[in-house]
Amino acid sequence: MPPPKDDDFASFVSTRSGPLLRLAVGLTGQRPAGEDLLQTALTRAYLSWGKVQAAGDADAYVRRIVVNTHLSLLRRRRVREDLQPQVADVVGNAPSYGIDDRDALWPALSRLGRRQRAIVLLRYYEDLPDDQIAELLGCRPATVRSQAMRALATLKDLPELAEHRPPPTRSAPTWEMP
């Protein structure tokens, strides 16, 4: 009979591997690299599973392991990333925007630095609050907000995303006094 640690960890992996894989693929830009990142992060989580459970929120703890593992692997390798739009086959609920929009977005994310990309993914894809993102990345919430603003400004100005922008909204007419 496997020890309870193995049962708890296996249960966690079976329920949370889909969202964690989406995060890993989003961070790396490629499904195989995302799978490798998730496997490395889950190995680290398993080795310290008692500490993970003692933290209270295993999902947040392992998400932080995924992000930190990604950042540390990039620091060690110093390789240029090449994001590919091969994320459509990730298991889970698809976002409400169209396939064409999503296919255009993934290569555009490669224009962002790794911290800005992590902030955009954690904020808009994982829907985490700024405080939690700041804790994950080891910075202040104000840094998260400013980096998100800069990342969105960079994405907004990219010509490859021009056709995917929503149409401008009409403002209410202004009335002048006669």
Image (cartoon, rainbow, N blue to C red):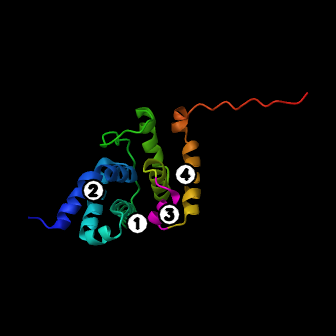
Name the amino acid type tagged 4. Answer: Ala
> Looking at the image, is mark 4 or mark 2 earlier in the sequence?
2
What's the magenta bit mostly, secondary-structure-wise? helix
Residue at x-position 58% and y-position 62%:
142
Residue ranking furthest to the left: 1
Q: Examine the rendered structure and indicate whether residue 20 appears above or below residue 75.
A: above
Question: Pointer 2: residues within 10 angstroms few (<14), some, or many (20+)?
Answer: some
> Looking at the image, is mark 2 or mark 3 earlier in the sequence?
2
Q: Examine the rendered structure and indicate whether residue 92 appears above or below residue 120.
A: above
Using the numbered discs, state the Cα–Cα distance from disc 1 to disc 2 in whole angstroms: 16 Å
Using the numbered discs, state the Cα–Cα distance from disc 2 to disc 3 in whole angstroms: 25 Å
Q: State which quarter of the image contains the C terminus.
A: top right
Residue at x-position 38% and y-position 44%:
84
Name the amino acid type tagged 3. Answer: Ala
Segment colored magenta: 128-138
Q: State which quarter of the image contains the N terminus.
A: bottom left
* 81 displayed left or right of 147: left
Give the residue pinned by disc 4.
151
Give the residue pinned by disc 2.
36
Question: Pointer 1: residues within 10 angstroms few (<14), some, or many (20+)?
Answer: few
Residue ranking furthest to the right: 178
Query: Does the stretch in magenta take in 135?
Result: yes
Using the numbered discs, state the Cα–Cα distance from disc 1 to disc 3 in whole angstroms: 19 Å
Give the residue pinned by disc 1.
75
| Image location (x, y in percent) of residue 72 | 38, 66
Mark 1 lies on a secondary structure that is helix
Give the residue pinned by disc 3.
134
